[in-house]
Image (cartoon, helix red, strand yellow):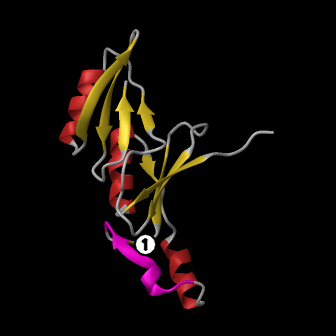
Amino acid sequence: MAFDVQVAIDCAAPHELADWWAEALGWQVESQDESLIRRMIQTGAAAEGDTIRHRGALVWRAGAAINSPDPDRPRVLFQHVPEPKNGKNRVHVDVRVGPERQEAEVSRLLAMGATELWRASQGPHAWVTMADPEGNEFCVG
């Protein structure tokens, strides 16, 4: 039996973080249907407080998602949580670019607001552990 998988990332600012990761990975932010959101508010199924404006569009406050151009890759959902990140991630994203592109990608991500945390290697494999603008760790290798 096969399952559909989605990766969920807790964060304080889901729309901004979705924008950042979409740019970092070359993916697309999933559009939200503003007319559906308005209908849900009009019928009482949702409240105005459940929404915000992001880049001029009415969107759900609770989250945003990104999708890969490759439909076989999982959707990534960024969901709002009230508490700040506390401690090391138990799950993280590996951005695999290959040794020939690693330094260029690290530089590009640093310029986008990522932070380099440390470098490590095991045998022939080397990676750079970084943090996105909210402090979520990921590796570039």
Q: Is residue 117 left or right of residue 42?
A: left
- Asked if residue 54 lies in the magenta stretch, the reply is yes
Q: Quadrant of the C terminus?
A: top left
Tell me, yes or no, if residue 17 can be seen here.
yes
Between 69 and 9, the one nearer to me in the picture:
9
Q: What stretch of residues is rendered in magenta?
A: 46-55
Q: Quadrant of the N terminus?
A: top right
- Asked if residue 127 lies in the magenta stretch, the reply is no
Q: Is residue 32 above or below residue 71?
A: below
Q: Please state which amino acid type lies under the numbered disc 1.
A: Arg
Q: Is residue 117 above or below residue 100?
A: below
Image point (40%, 69%), residue name: 82
Q: Is residue 116 left or right of residue 91?
A: left
| Residue 93 x, y percent position in the rendering | 44, 38
Classify residue 105 by image quadrant.
top left
| Residue 125 x, y percent position in the rendering | 40, 15
**Mark 1 Cα shell of 10 Å, populated few (<14), some (14-19), many (≥20):** some
Q: Residue furthest right?
A: 1
Q: Which residue is mark 1?
A: 61
Classify residue 13 by image quadrant.
bottom left
Image point (46%, 64%), residue name: 63
Between 20 and 57, the one nearer to me in the picture:
20
Image point (31%, 46%), residue name: 132
| Residue 84 x, y percent position in the rendering | 34, 62
Classify residue 96 by image quadrant.
top left
